[in-house]
């Protein structure tokens, strides 16, 4: 499995006319991978179905093609892995494997509320990667709601401080592509 990508999607497959809130120029710039060279982050925000995972995979595919080490995980998968590692006294080792990839995609931040332990494990990953490697994050929650997501406004601020210091944020507004497909098939009203 290629960097554990759940499936392959490309930028060429993305219909920008359907999602006008996305600046095509910004995506084209990101696809040039300057952000990877500079160890900057990419944060994709927006409601379900607007293409956050698609675009994060498409950027991951670009990075793999350019020869970078890439790892894709949902936040939930990463936290499960880290908590198991802690129980098995392998936390340090697993943290190292999460710092090594030049691009780490963490998909679906905000769907599950995080406990203190989750939030502090996430903080450790972000702190270690800070200014060393790029992290691509997707979330259905806007930054103002991250305090609630992380269950701790102070920790959320510290996380955002590092993440946003060198980052491109895309606020995707618009309709779900999934629902559009359903509508077209006549499955919705
Ligand atoms: P999100 O992660 O924001 O919930 P996804 O990236 O999973 O949404 O998109 C849902 C589905 O719709 C995927 O199959 C994706 O490839 C497709 N999709 C979303 N937006 C577009 C678009 N603008 N053009 C083409 N396919 C899209
Ligand atoms: Mg998604």
Image (cartoon, helix red, strand yellow):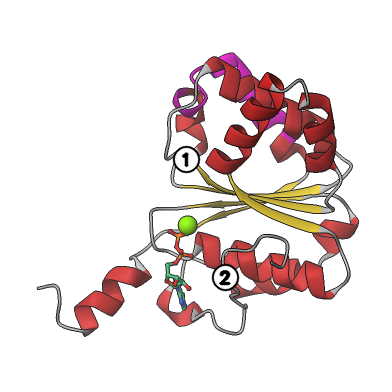
Query: To which residue does mark 1 refer?
Result: 142
Query: To which residue does mark 2 refer?
Result: 7
| Outermost residue toward the front in this view | 88
Q: In this picture, is 105 found above or below 182?
A: above
Q: In this picture, is 30 found above or below 8?
A: above
Residue 151 lies in the magenta stretch: yes
Residue 168 rendering spot, x and y as whole percentages: 69, 52
Residue 72 rendering spot, x and y as whole percentages: 66, 55
* Alpha carbon distance from label 1 to label 2: 26 Å
- Give whichever of discs 1 and 2 has the lower sequence position: 2
Left/right of residue 52 with respect to residue 32 in the rendered view = left
Quarter holding the C terminus is bottom left
> What secondary structure do most residues of the magenta stretch adopt?
helix
Magenta region, residue range: 148-162
Residue at left offset 50%, top offset 20%: 115
Q: In this picture, is 63 found above or below 128?
A: below
Residue nearest the observer in this picture, 54 or 96: 96
Label 2 packing within 10 angstroms: few (<14), some (14-19), many (20+): few
Residue at left offset 27%, top offset 69%: 179
Which of the 4 image quarters holds residue 55? bottom right
């Amino acid at each position: 499995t290629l960097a554990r990508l759940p499936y392959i999607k490309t930028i060429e497959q993305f219909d920008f006319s359907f999602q006008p809130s996305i600046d095509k120029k910004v995506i084209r710039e990101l696809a040039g991978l300057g952000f990877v060279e500079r160890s900057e982050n990419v944060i994709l925000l927006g409601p379900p179905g607007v293409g956050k995972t698609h675009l994060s995979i498409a950027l991951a595919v670009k990075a793999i093609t350019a020869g970078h080490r890439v790892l894709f995980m949902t936040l939930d998968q990463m936290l499960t892995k880290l908590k198991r590692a802690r129980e098995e006294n392998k936390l340090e080792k697993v943290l190292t494997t999460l710092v090594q990839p030049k691009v780490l995609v963490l998909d679906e931040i905000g769907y599950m509320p995080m406990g203190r332990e989750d939030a502090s494990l996430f903080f450790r990953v972000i702190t270690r990667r800070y200014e060393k490697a790029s992290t691509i994050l997707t979330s259905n929650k806007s930054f103002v709601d991250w305090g609630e997501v992380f269950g701790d406004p102070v920790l959320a601020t510290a996380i955002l401080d590092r993440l946003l210091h060198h980052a491109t944020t895309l606020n995707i507004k618009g309709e779900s592509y999934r629902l559009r497909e359903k509508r077209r098939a006549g499955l919705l009203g």
